[in-house]
Amino acid sequence: MSHRSHVLAASIVAASTVRSTFSAHAAASAPHPPIAAFNRAQSSAFASPFALGSSWSQRSLFRCELTANVRVDLSQKEAHGTRPNFRRTAAAMLLSTKADPTGSVSDVLRTAYREGDTDAVLAAAPDLLRQHSARELIVAAIDAADGRTGPSASIANALLGGCVRISSETEGGGEFGAGMARDLLDEWDDLGDEGDFEVAAPDLVTFCLAYAALDAGGEPAWTAVANNVLDRARRLAKKRGGSKIRKAANRAARRRGRPDDGDTVGGEMIATDAADELAARYGTDFRILHEDADLVVVSKPSGMVCFHKHKTTAGKVGKKKRKKKRGNSGGDSDSEDGENGNIPDVSLEDSLASLDVPLSNLNPDGRGIVHRIDRGTSGCVVLAKTDEAHARLVAEFFTRGAFKRYDALVPARPSSASGVATAVVGSGELEESGEIDLPVDGKASRSIYEVKRRIGDVCLLLGLETKTGRKHQVRVHCSEGLGRPLYLDPVYGAPRVTKAAGSRSKKGRGSRVLDEEVPGDLPDPIARIAKGSEGRQRFFLHASALRIPKLGVDVTAPLPLWWQEALTELEGSGC
């Protein structure tokens, strides 16, 4: 009999033995009264017998049965050459009968982080939080990272993300999630102070996740603790941001001192009131999609960055620049600004702040910025107006409570220079829908795609939903996953042709596109855009929809005008 069969047989025998003695142990180990009601609430939502207060025999029985089931599942999957189910594998490792519980958890966290980064840790976190103390979990996170402070902080943040999930997704879980978040943060601080471990200091993401979990506690005492954590985040942001954050806070304080003027929030001008002026300055592709007292969702035009990490005079919005108007595409080449006639490089942050739209101060790089899309990408971006909303938004994005969809225009046929086309059938045609599972910068990444429209035999209009949030994920998945790079993508796109010499030069990731180069082998409507003054600041990727159910956000952004014109011409030309 093989070693696997011996282990499986032993697990089944152990399960039978525990089942036979279950009644005797259950009477002696009933749940503690204060948490019994909470355990009942958990059973329907998580179907897990190792919630707080579960008896030793219940946990042992589940441990043996789950281990046996997972090993059978892995054996079957290995025989068929398919990927193992990581969530079940991690659960089996968690419930192993090792004498050292911290060592067991370290194995779970190490495997999860290695195989699926923070997403896999986040998936296992709710179960881990119910089985182990905060001290065990933080020590295990440090051990699982093998002394590397960055990964240990990422793992610990994922555990805090598990607290957020428990608080928001489980009936009656708010108090438990808040308590575990408080304990995790306390243990993290204590271990750093003791000096026995190499521990990274909590970062802004840490404080935002802890705030969200604590704020969901539902009691005034938890709210007070949450506010203390938020104050720590503010102090850290102020320290990292220096004079930029201090000046922004002073401006916001002065605005709050003004009497209310018309339709305002907290005495401050709101973006909706300024929608017409924003469109006049930056083009009609600049739209306000949603706004409330806490946040604002904008459709960003192509060519505009979300924020400038290093400020320049070209990005300032002074009195003269406020009077200038930009065209529908986010810039008009006939406009003049200064001596050289260039369009001011105004960021999304600056465009709103210049009209006194209140923005949070928790991100020292860009006020109100919670996530971002590339300069060449258009579409949905949400900005926080208050620090409280900023923390909740960070928590929603981290725990995958925000759902993003994109539109992408790509070649109909795969590029031979691109990577493996994982979703292509033998004929070279792309399936109507599928999944792209391809690491981005070494991190597990997953996207779902569908073919929305076929434009002749030249172009495809794709719809994509990202299941993870990696930098350049859609661009990499189209180029290397489907073998079809975005049209006009300067980094992951097709080779480019030098105008003067006509020679072809390959461009790799991170390379700079020279002024005299334009993409080769493009349909005429797209080639004209590439040769225009703003062709280098646009590519065919549009963040078409954003949904954050917990915060009441559900918006769609129409395609930019230049997109619509290109698609109409492509379809009319019979490409």
Image: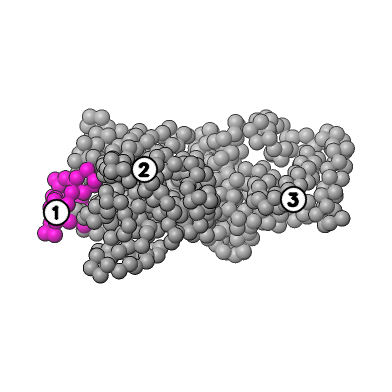
Q: Which residues are magenta?
A: 314-342
Report the front residue among 390 and 256. Answer: 390
Q: Which residue is mark 1?
A: 337
> 387 and 509: which one is in front?
509
**Label 1: how many residues lie within 10 Å, few (<14), some (14-19) or many (20+)?**
some
Callout 1 amino acid: Asp
The disc placed on residue 75 is 3
- Quarter where residue 570 is shown: top left
- Label 1, secondary structure: give it: loop
Could you tell me residue 483's position as x and y percent?
A: 46, 54
Residue 496 image point, x, y percent: 32, 62
Secondary structure category for the residue under label 3: helix
Q: Which residue was labeled with disc 2?
A: 455
x and y, in percent, of residue 137 in the image: 64, 52
Q: Is residue 477 magenta?
A: no
Q: Position of residue 225 (x, y in %)?
A: 51, 42
**24 left or right of 510?**
right
- Tag 2: Cα neighbours inside 10 Å, few (<14), some, or many (≥20)? many
Amino acid, disc 2: Ile
